[in-house]
């Protein structure tokens, strides 16, 4: 069991909890912090302090005062009115991630919620309750209001839960799993939804897939490098050293190690290789550098408080930590990296199609009679172009909402969500390069360096290279 404590979350803990479904509990130290903060909120209310979203309305209705006898039902109404979305249900891992991240944020002891609410969320996670949450409907400010409201509804026994991929009434599933619906207290409705955890969960989910595809891109490019008789001289780490790029040095060393034993034959007539081979350390190094930047920001956001208002030292702080601009920009950066990776791969596929007569045209066994991988390259071009259009920066877009009360929004959820489609497209491009490079190596009967030879032999245990159309 993993303890939620002051050390916070990291990506390894996140994977274990969200994907491997390890159970969690709140540490005693955090419990005390939550209870003390809750007492401060109740004391402020007792003194008659007006607190946004607790005894006032929300958004454009912030100046409306909520009578004391309606405060609790008001918190429920916030969830009911805000639970509006569109599209397919979010993947279970994204929903689990959003719940975990919200638990971690509320556990900072600055949101004024009760320990009982957080314990109920922990119970949801530990019993693998997956609320139905539509993928579309958040502008990433004031937090991910709509998607998080669907989670909140299930906590109070309303809404729908996904059970065996079917939408079922929440009250029915909670009863089946022996979970009591929760009764919201002051501030707890807004505290469940006024954060960026859905956008962040989308981003993290895509980040893990991006990491895997980046590894595939490196492997594919290694095979292409050998198939295209690449020159290893530009791979020297010295070039990274004089460029002041640790990431370029790292990529150079990875390639030099993987290509140990490889020798260039000298098939190419030109003095220098095309950029898609010669500039691998520079381009992959840049991707690695910004991947590391995104990872650092993700971990920072995982342990951040994105609520509003905040209760600190007996005082109320009204702010805008619910704004998802950091996440939106980070997702935009990842979109650019995905687009670059796909474009870079597609250009090597082009080289593998026999443009310099190093290889048969389109890797066809009998040119003219066979078309070879002609259309495989066309597919990669289509997917690459599609990703270019999807890489438009969502963070550069904004539309005012709530009658201009929320006049500049982040579009963080949209920015992260389109990464799903981009990564699927990238996967297609990289696989075309991978199978094209394997076919080229097979046709040229190339002796591979040991590292690549092991991968090649492993693949051919289950797959056969067929040269006929």
Image: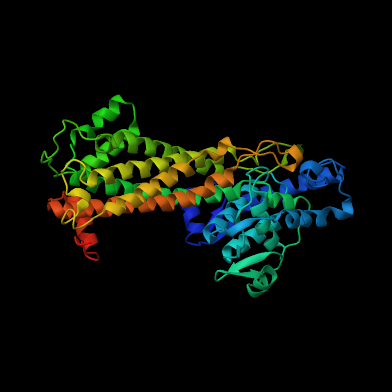
The percent coordinates of residue 107 (x first, y second) are 64, 49
Residue 409 occupies quadrant: top right
> Which residue is located at x 32 percent, y 54 percent?
431
Residue 84 visible at all: yes
Q: Is there any visible trace of residue 302 in the rendered image?
A: no
Residue at 78% from the left image edge and 56% from the top image edge: 77
Query: Residue 209: image x %, image y %?
Result: 43, 52
Query: Which is nearer the eye, 75 or 38?
Result: 75
On the rendered structure, is 116 left or right of 397?
Answer: right
- Residue 242 on image: x %, y %: 29, 24
Q: Identify the residue at horizontal 30%, vertical 53% (top origin).
A: 376
> Relative to residue 285, is residue 129 drawn left or right?
right
Q: Quadrant of residue 397?
A: top right
Q: Quadrant of residue 317?
A: top right
Q: Quadrant of the C terminus?
A: bottom left
Extreme-bottom residue of the structure:
176
């Amino acid at each position: 069991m993993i303890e939620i404590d002051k050390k916070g979350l990291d990506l390894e803990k996140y994977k274990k909890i969200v994907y491997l479904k390890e159970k969690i509990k709140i540490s005693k130290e955090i419990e005390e912090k939550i209870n003390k903060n809750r007492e401060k909120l109740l004391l402020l209310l007792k003194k008659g302090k007006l607190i946004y979203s607790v005894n006032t309305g929300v958004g454009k209705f912030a100046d409306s005062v909520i009578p004391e006898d309606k405060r609790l039902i008001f918190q429920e109404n916030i969830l009911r009115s805000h639970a509006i979305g569109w599209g397919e249900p979010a993947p279970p891992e994204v929903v689990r991630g959003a719940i975990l991240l919200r638990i971690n944020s509320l556990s900072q002891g600055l949101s004024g919620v009760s320990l009982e609410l957080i314990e109920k969320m922990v119970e949801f996670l530990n019993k693998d309750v997956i609320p139905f949450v539509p993928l579309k409907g958040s502008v990433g400010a004031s937090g991910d209001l709509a998607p998080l409201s669907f989670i909140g509804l299930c906590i109070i026994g309303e809404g729908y839960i996904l059970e065996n991929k079917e939408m079922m009434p929440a009250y029915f599933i909670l009863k089946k799993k022996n979970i009591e619906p929760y009764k919201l207290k002051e501030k707890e409705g807004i505290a469940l939804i006024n954060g960026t955890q859905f956008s962040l969960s989308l981003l993290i989910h895509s980040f893990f897939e991006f990491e895997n595809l980046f590894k595939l891109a490196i492997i594919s490019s290694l095979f292409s490098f050998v198939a295209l008789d690449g020159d290893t001289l530009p791979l020297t780490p010295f070039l990274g050293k004089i460029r002041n790029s640790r990431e370029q040095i790292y990529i150079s060393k990875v390639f030099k190690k993987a290509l140990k034993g490889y020798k260039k034959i000298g098939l190419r007539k030109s003095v220098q290789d095309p950029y898609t081979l010669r500039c691998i350390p520079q381009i992959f190094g840049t991707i690695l550098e910004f991947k590391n930047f995104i990872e650092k920001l993700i971990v920072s956001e995982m342990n951040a408080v994105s609520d509003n208002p905040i209760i600190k030292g007996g005082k109320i702080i009204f702010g805008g930590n619910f704004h998802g601009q950091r996440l939106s920009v980070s997702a935009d950066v990842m979109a650019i990296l995905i687009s670059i990776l796909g474009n870079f791969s597609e250009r090597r596929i082009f080289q593998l199609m026999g443009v310099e007569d190093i290889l048969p045209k389109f890797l066809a066994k009998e040119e003219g009679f066979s078309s070879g991988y002609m259309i495989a390259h066309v597919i990669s071009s289509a997917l690459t172009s599609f990703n270019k259009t999807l890489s438009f920066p969502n963070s550069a877009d904004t539309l005012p909402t709530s009658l201009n009360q929320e006049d500049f929004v982040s579009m963080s959820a949209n920015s992260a969500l389109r990464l799903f489609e981009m990564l699927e497209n990238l996967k297609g491009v990289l696989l075309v390069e991978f199978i094209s490079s394997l076919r080229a190596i097979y046709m040229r009967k190339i002796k591979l360096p040991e590292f690549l030879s092991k991968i090649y032999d492993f693949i051919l245990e289950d797959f056969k290279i067929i040269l006929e159309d």
